Image (cartoon, grey):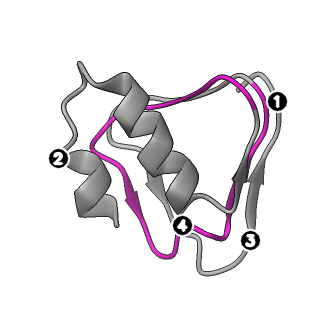
Amino acid sequence: MAQEFNIIPETESDKQEVKAREILGSAGKNLVIHSDWKFDNGKNIHVGDNFLANYNWTVLDVGKVTIGDNV
């Protein structure tokens, strides 16, 4: 799943958001994740509103990972 996300061009941010929402356990409004994104599971990651993950975000989500709003 990470590879599927990472091959989407940065110019297609709408497609990146759709794929990220498929991967994540939950996400609030205003979600932005830049590639290259690495994770173990994906469904164990929960992010709040107004979330931005910059380039090369790595999440070790064997267990639940929760990130709040405005991060």
The quadrant holding residue 30 is top right
Tell me which numbered mark, 1 or 2, is placed earlier along the sequence.
2
Mark sitting on residue 51: none
Name the residue: 35% across, 49% down. Answer: 37
Q: Residues under labels 3 and 2: Cα distance?
A: 26 Å
Q: For mark 4, what is the residue?
A: 42
In magenta, the rendered stretch is: 29-49
Tell me which numbered mark, 4 or 3, is placed earlier along the sequence.
4
Residue 50 versus residue 43 in the image, above or below: above
Name the residue: 23% across, 61% down. Answer: 3
User: Is residue 44 covered in magenta?
Assistant: yes
- Residue type for callout 3: Lys
Q: For mark 2, what is the residue?
A: 7
The quadrant holding residue 26 is bottom right
Q: Residues under labels 2 and 4: Cα distance?
A: 17 Å
Q: For mark 3, what is the residue?
A: 64
Contact flag, marks 1 and 2 (Cβ < 8 Å): no
Q: Which image quarter holds the N terminus?
A: bottom left
What secondary structure do most residues of the magenta stretch adopt? loop
User: Is residue 17 covered in magenta?
Assistant: no
Please, what secondary structure does the residue beneath circle 2 have? loop
Tell me which numbered mark, 2 or 4, is placed earlier along the sequence.
2
- Residue type for callout 1: Asp
